[in-house]
Image (cartoon, helix red, strand yellow):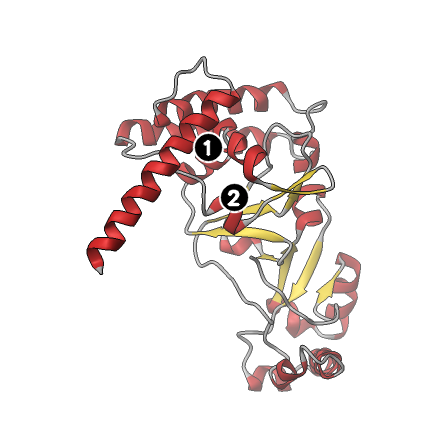
Amino acid sequence: MGNQPLDGGYYLFTPEEKDAFLQAEPQAALFFKRWFGSQELLQGKVRYCLYLGNCTETKLAQMPEVLERIEAVRAFRLKSKSASKLAQSPTQFHVTNIPQSNFMVIPEVSSSRRDYIPIAFMHPEDGLCSNLVKIFPEAELFHFSVLSSSVHMVWVKTVCGRLKMDYRYSTELVYNTFPWPQDVDSKLKQQLEAAAQVILDTRAQEKDATLAQLYDPDLMPSALRLAHASNDRLVMKAYGFDPSWNEGQIFTGLYRLYQHLIAAEAIESAQCV
């Protein structure tokens, strides 16, 4: 999961609120980060977070407006039975997960109308993620390629929970059970990475479009659809699947791989006892 501030909203700002705050407290500029929850990721909504987890006491003492926010968070947490202990450290999030290298962001809830879950490939300087999305630290383009494929979507459609009719992506139920392709040679891995980059580059060309718009089946640009189709063919090859297979056959292939990996894990565990 991403970060969970448990702050009563006192550390979250719209662009207008951020600008107004910095007029009164310009030194706080270094501590503002873009904030990405599900709406920010998919709909392009812009919000910022005042992240003080690494701010020194000396620096905090120089920013009275920031100190007011800290006290507001402390008071908010003291009113909550479940969060009262956290009031002792109001500059810290309840849950902190900040990747130090490339990472992927997977929306926790995604429309089942989409052919693919819109997954973002991000860098630490891009901002912080909320607990309404899943993050994949130390991500490589290879990982993005596989998770952005129709093969992964077959697994999602079959095992994923639902929120009404939308997919609810679960770390435990979906990601941790997903069988990755085994023994992918270096040449094919490079091709998968290149296909992933094409998807990202094609998205970037649509500067004014949100991820929700790009992955709406009625609005998806043809170039992006073609980029995904090319990636799909390579991922099918990585699994050793016949390109003519339908979704049922793909799931059967994935489930057989899942059973094989579980059996191998059980044998390894038994040998370690």
199 vs 175: above or below: above
Extreme left residue here? 271
Q: Could you tell which of marks 2 and 1 lies nearer the N-terminus? A: 2
Q: CA distance from mark 2 to mark 1?
A: 24 Å
Which residue is rendered at x = 72% and y = 64% of the image? 12
**Residue bearing the label numbered 2:** 174
**2 and 1 marks in contact (CB < 8 Å):** no
Q: Three-letter amino acid code at disc 1? A: Gln
Q: Quadrant of residue 20?
A: bottom right
Left-right relation of 168 to 20: left
Which residue is rendered at x = 60% and y = 71% of the image? 93
Left-right relation of 58 to 132: left
- Residue 191 at x, y percent in the picture: 36, 27
Mark 2, secondary structure of its residue: helix
Which residue is rendered at x = 31% and y = 42% of the image? 263
- Residue 251 at x, y percent in the picture: 47, 28
234 vs 78: above or below: above
**Residue bearing the label numbered 1:** 197
Q: Quadrant of residue 221?
A: top right
Quadrant containing the N terminus in the rendered view? bottom right
Which residue is rendered at x = 42% and y = 40% of the image? 143
